[in-house]
């Protein structure tokens, strides 16, 4: 079985920027260690990617905090994580979940048996969205989330997202 790691949105704005939290900063080393367990060809990373007019978008009106605007320092992946991700494929996504990521994993699953593990930020927004999207695309593969390599907007919303994922047959480690 091929083991795939998906690193969700470990960007500066989510770690220590406009939407950063102490919990997010606190998982960086654990995420780097997890990345080290995989070969680059078995890693996908996502990058939340917004236009300059973010505040005019539906998401921007609902979450009026400018973040991850393409080309800005906050859009970049945290330096430690970026160094660990050398050689991995990075997928820019304009919203919480990535259909492109799910399709790439589906293409792999057509050729061989895979297991997908997710880590990253934020548990309660983009991690849960991608985990559920992958599970919807690939209901028969094992989808896992490493809780100690994720952080939510708040500790309570992190726990709520983990509970939601468990209810949807995603293994929480």
Image (cartoon, rainbow, N blue to C red):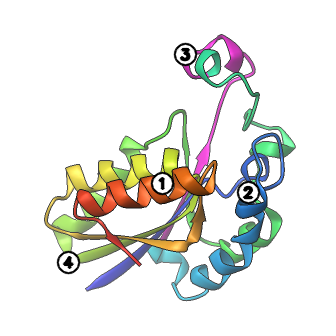
Ranked by sequence position, the earlier of labels 2 and 3 is: 3
* Position of residue 54 in the picture relative to residue 170 (left or right): right
Q: Where, by quadrant of the figure, is residue 117 drawn? A: bottom left
**Counting residues from the N terminus, which is met first, the one under dot 4 or under dot 1?**
4
Q: Hey, which residue is sitting farthest top in the picture?
A: 56
SS under mark 2: loop
Q: Position of residue 20 (x, y in %)?
A: 77, 50
The image shows residue 109 at horizontal and vertical percentages of 22, 67
Residue corresponding to mark 3: 58
First-in-chain label (4 vs 2)? 2
Residue visible at 31% across and 48% down?
Answer: 133
The label nearer to you, 2 versus 3, is 3
In this view, the residue in front, 126 or 88, is: 126
Figure check: 10 above or below 67: below
Q: Is residue 72 visible?
A: yes
Q: Is residue 104 visible?
A: no
Residue located beneath label 1 in the image: 127
Using the image, tell me which numbered label, if any, was put on residue 113: 4
- In terms of sequence position, does the residue under pointer 1 or pointer 2 come before the other? 2
The region drawn magenta spans: 43-59
C-alpha distance separating marks 4 and 1: 22 Å
- Residue sitting at 49 percent across and 39 percent down? 96
Q: Are marks 3 and 4 in contact (CB under 8 Å)?
A: no
Q: Nearer the viewer, residue 57 or 104?
A: 57
Distance from label 1 to label 2 (Cα)? 16 Å
Position of 9 compared to 107: left or right? Answer: right
The 10 Å Cα crowd at callout 2, few under 14, some 14 to 19, many 20 or more, is many
- Check the image and report above or below for 170 versus 37: above
Q: Is residue 47 magenta?
A: yes
Query: Tag 3, which secondary structure?
Result: helix
Circle 2 sits on which residue?
A: 77
| Marks 3 and 1 in Cβ contact (< 8 Å) | no
């Amino acid at each position: 079985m091929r083991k795939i790691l998906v690193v969700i949105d470990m960007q500066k704005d989510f770690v220590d920027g406009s939407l950063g939290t102490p919990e997010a900063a606190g998982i960086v080393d654990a995420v780097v260690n997890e990345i080290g367990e995989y070969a680059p060809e078995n890693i996908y990373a996502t990058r939340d990617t917004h236009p300059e007019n973010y505040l005019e978008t539906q998401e921007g009106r609902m979450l009026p905090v400018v973040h991850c605007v393409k080309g800005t320092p906050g859009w970049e992946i945290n330096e430690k994580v970026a160094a660990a991700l050398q050689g991995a494929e990075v997928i820019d996504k304009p919203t919480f979940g990535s259909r492109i990521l799910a399709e790439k994993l589906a293409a792999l699953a057509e050729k061989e048996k895979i297991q997908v593990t997710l880590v990253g930020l934020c548990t309660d927004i983009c991690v849960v969205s991608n985990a559920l999207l992958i599970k919807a695309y690939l209901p028969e593969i094992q989808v896992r989330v490493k809780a100690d390599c994720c952080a939510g907007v708040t500790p309570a919303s992190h726990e709520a997202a983990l509970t939601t994922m468990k209810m949807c047959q995603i293994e929480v480690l």
